[in-house]
Amino acid sequence: MKIIPQELIDRWAWTPDKKVIVKEDPEPVVVPSFGFDLDYIINNYQNFKEGKLHVALKKALEHATFEGIVLTMPELIRLKNSVGKDHYFWKNYSDVHTEENLGIDIEGLYMPRGEGVVLVIHGGGLLTPERIETAITEGLINGSAKYEDEEFQELLRGNLPSGETIPIYNLADVRKEDFSAGTRRFGVALPLEEARRVNSGLQDKTTFLNNSLVIARNGGVKGLEEFFDKANEGNVVGNHHILSGRDPTQAQGRLLYLISSYYGLDGNYDLDYIGRFVGVAPKAHVARGGRAK
């Protein structure tokens, strides 16, 4: 029998026989899928580097507009697979528009009720430039933004503060199916305990390809083997996290980072660090302003 800690019962006024009521939002706005092919992105990207991460993200988003994109972890991995090692994407690191959040799954949407969950969001979730700036002003926790409980629960439901909705999948889903063709904005939920257990650091090919946190950060298994083969030096590629010891009763989140070399995928950098993002404007925008690099 699952035992819910008393502190959680007190905090969220949850009882074993209490029904969870999920509020229904009228006519949610569904996030569209944008059909940018790799060649278009390679020929029309622009990098935005600033001394503050939220400023760099703001400039990248403003350049992209609603109809453009700021590259996510899966998108940047696909792009690196498609270009030579002498390309900008291999010579420079980049923050990505992929955030890694953790908290408690109060309603049992993806985990048993009351257990910790890691929620990786591709394409933008809670961490807008404004939300990051507010988090820094109010004080970070472990270098991450502190979330209100309901704020995190809404994200688990796929509801964004903007009124948009995104699909959320569990780890088993993305292990067996590629969802990136349907939408570039989605989430992957996996147990916090499982994410804590996976190796943080350099790892061999078998370990890397079967690492559940790598798969969530990539939004699935597509492109991972190709990325490993291209990135590796000494037959290892990195995946770094600092999830061990984190207390999920304080929901929190940060943005991820793709290092230029075999050091690989990284979740170790704080929100008040410097930022560098890759933005891609829509075709109409580029036609007016010329190719951006």
Image (cartoon, rainbow, N blue to C red):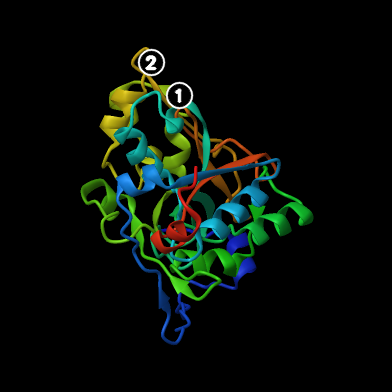
Q: Is residue 109 above or below residue 214?
A: below
Kindly identify the amino acid type of the residue bearing the numbered disc 2.
Answer: Glu
Q: Position of residue 29 (x, y in %)?
A: 43, 77
> Within 10 angstroms of label 1, few (less than 14), some, or many (20 or more) residues?
some
Q: Position of residue 156 (x, y in %)?
A: 46, 64
Q: Residue at x 46, y 68 (%)?
A: 107
Q: Which residue is mark 1?
A: 261
Q: Is residue 186 left or right of residue 118?
A: left
Residue nearer the viewer, 4 or 281: 281
Q: Is residue 173 left or right of residue 287?
A: left
Tag on residue 233? 2
Q: Is residue 134 left or right of residue 3?
A: right
Q: Work out whether residue 9 can be spotted.
A: no
Kindly identify the amino acid type of the residue bearing the numbered disc 1.
Answer: Ser
Residue nearer the viewer, 13 or 195: 195
Q: Residue at x 47, y 28 (%)?
A: 260
Q: Residue at x 65, y 53 (%)?
A: 145
Q: Position of residue 199 (x, y in %)?
A: 43, 29
